[in-house]
Every structure is written in structure tokens, then in C-alpha cells.
Image: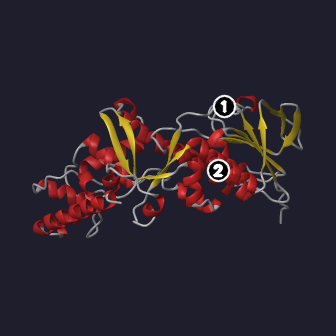
Amino acid sequence: MTHIAPLRTIVLAGSGVRLALCAALIARHCLSEATKIIVLNCADADIVDADMILRPDMQRLHNDLQIQVDALQSRAKARAVYAVDCAYDGGRIALPFGDYGMARDGAAFHHHWSKGKGLGQPYDLDQYSPSLAIHHGKSQLPLAIAAQIGIGFGLQVDRAGYAQLLLAKARDLGAKIVSAAQVTVRKGSADYPYSITMDSAQFEADFFIDVSRSGQWAGSIGLAETGWQDHSLYLPYSDQPQGIEASHLYSAIQRFIDMLPTRGGGTAERREYNRLAQEQSERIADMVCLLGNDDKSISQRPALRRKIEVFQTCGRIPVEDYEVFSPAEWLTILLTKCGNPLHHDRLADRLSEQDLLIWLDQLRGKIGQLKRQLESI
């Protein structure tokens, strides 16, 4: 059996939430007696908006790091959010985190709704979304209540407070956090691939991760684009649609951890990492392209073009590998941009027309009741 030589020193450089999130996650899964984690917290050039949206999948990160709701509320001013408002060529649109209605008789809910529209049912699809009912409501739910009502939600957090919370977690887990005004990264020796100068100090690293938004150090070590090359990683940055920034970064660093290299190898893992990263980036680009409604760009994106064509015909939404956005999010923008499909799923015809209209009315009534109850809290 081949001896596996673990990395001795992993160095991360960057600032803000990007650095803090990666530092906490890598410290949680990679730090050991054999592997040190050094985090270079540079002058913060990454500050954008004061607040940021965390999609529902980020709850897995908080569970993994054992970050409690109380800490998120007190240190990051977290509050529950059920949809994100996105700009598109026709104005603004709310993309819900939760589903519309419920599937029945093997057909997704929107097929039943589409059939109902053909029968004269007058209500828009958003009337059947608990997520949008809360999103457009008057009250902001406390996290404790949001966790009890069984509807998936994300978080809106204070960016600076969230970064401090994650960086403190990385420190508690054993990472060495160093404030640095100036960092220079150069190719090192055969034993240590990188030589890093930080202010007046110098040290070597087996692996270097550039967490900056702009790839501040990537160019100096030969990284022309995001991805994993040799003994370094330049992490992607996406801030559109709203809420994707943290999720994209989280999945990128989690993927790296899953394929963590050793001192002696990593070629196959590196190729696979970059392939999966590209697939995910394409799915994000598909959504950005559809929101922008650039016909020329859409024509150059086969997966997005297929989504549009299939949806326009029969209302189905093809699922690509490594999807980032939920079916409800795709449904919202496809319906807005493309209009109603030519026909609904035939499985929706199992329900009689009379029973369908009664059921739709009952669902809308329940969602209205939920909205009124939550607004009274």
C-alpha cells in the first residue's frame, strides 16, 4: 500500500466572509497533528453590501460547525428569509426557497395549477407559495419560530458580524489567524511548493488557497483562472443572483475537502474537482443568463435552451447535473419569462375538474390562513 503523506501546512489568504467561511470549514475537517492551518487575514478589500443572503443549504455548514441559532442572531443579526428578490430585464422578481403547493397523483403542483387556469381559476401561482406569502408579509419571523413551521428558509445576516463569527470558530478549532497588511506569494522549493512573505515574516506552505474575490495572489503563482492547479486553489466568486455568493463558495471548499490531496499526488482529484466546479458554475451562469434575457447568450447555452424548450412545450423542468437552484426558483423565472406551457402533465388529469378547483381553493385558503397567523405574532 502506498504511504500517504499528509499536507503539513495549508495557507489561506483573503478577507471578510470568504476567508472566514473557508477557514472555519478547512479547520473543521483538515487540521490535525500533522497538518497546520494558517489563515492570513488581509486588509479587507472584499466589503460590498452590509448584509448578505444565505441560502437554505448553508444550514448544513452551521450544523457542521455547531453554530447555534442564538449566536447567529446575536453576532450576525440573522433573520429568516424565504425568497430572494432578483433584478431581471422586466423589473424585479422574488425567487422562493420553498415549493409551490404540493404534488398530487404523480404530477408537480404547477401542472394542476396550469390546468386550473385553463378552467378559469383566476389566481396567480404565487398565491400557492407559503414562502412567497411570508416573504411578502408584513412581519419578520424570529428564527425560533421559523424553525418550527416546516417551511425551508435562508438567512439575512450582517456581513461583518457573520465573518467575525466564522473566523472565531476557525480559531477555536485550532487554525492560526494572522492579521497581515501585505502578503506576497512566490513559487518555493521541491519540498515546499510556496514561499510566503507576510509583512516581515516568511514561511513555506504545501498548499496555498487564494480566497480573494479578484484572485489577488493567483497571478503571481501562475493561476490564470479559478480552480485547482498543482498545489494551489483559487476559489470562485459569484454574487448574482442574490444569495449565491456564500453557497457557491461553500460547495467549492467542501468539494476540495472531499478530494483533499496529499504531498505526493492529486492529479486525478484535481481534474475531477475542476470538472465539477465548471459544471456548477455553468448552472449559475444559466440562471444569470435567463434573468438577463439575452437571446444570443441563451442560444449559446445548450442546457438552458433545453430547459426553456421543454418547459414551453409541456411544463417540465429538466434537471441538470449539479443544479444549484431549486425547481421552484426555475419555475418562477421560466413562467415569468416564457409564459404558460402549451400543455400540462397528463397525470394532472387524474383529478376531476370539479375536485381540482375545490382543492386549489382549499390550498389557497390554507396559505392565506398561515399568513394571517404569522402576521399576528
Q: Residue 326's x, y, as percent?
A: 41, 54
Residue type beneath disc 1 = Ala
Q: Horizontally, is 266 left or right of 346 in the view?
A: right
Name the mark nearer the viewer: 1 or 2. Answer: 2
Q: Horizontally, is 351 left or right of 201 in the view?
A: left
Considering the numbered disc 2 on the image, is that residue within a helix, a strand or a loop?
helix
Q: Residue at x 78, y 55 (%)?
A: 174
Disc ID at residue 165: 2
Mark 2 surroundings within 10 Å by alpha-carbon count, few (fewer than 14), some (14 through 19), many (20 or more): many
Q: Residue at x 66, y 36 (%)?
A: 212
Evaluate whether residue 37 shows in this view: yes
Write down the quadrant of residue 58 in the picture. bottom right
Identify which residue, 243 or 222, lies in the foreground: 243
Residue type beneath disc 2 = Leu
Evaluate whether residue 345 shows in this view: no
Q: Residue at x 63, y 34 (%)?
A: 225
The answer to whether marks 1 and 2 mark residues whose Cβ atoms lie closer than 8 Å is no
Q: Residue 287's x, y, as percent?
A: 41, 42
Q: Residue 293's x, y, as percent?
A: 34, 33
Q: Residue 325's x, y, as percent?
A: 43, 50
Separation (CA) of disc 1 from disc 2 = 32 Å
Considering the numbered disc 1 on the image, is that residue within a helix, a strand or a loop?
loop
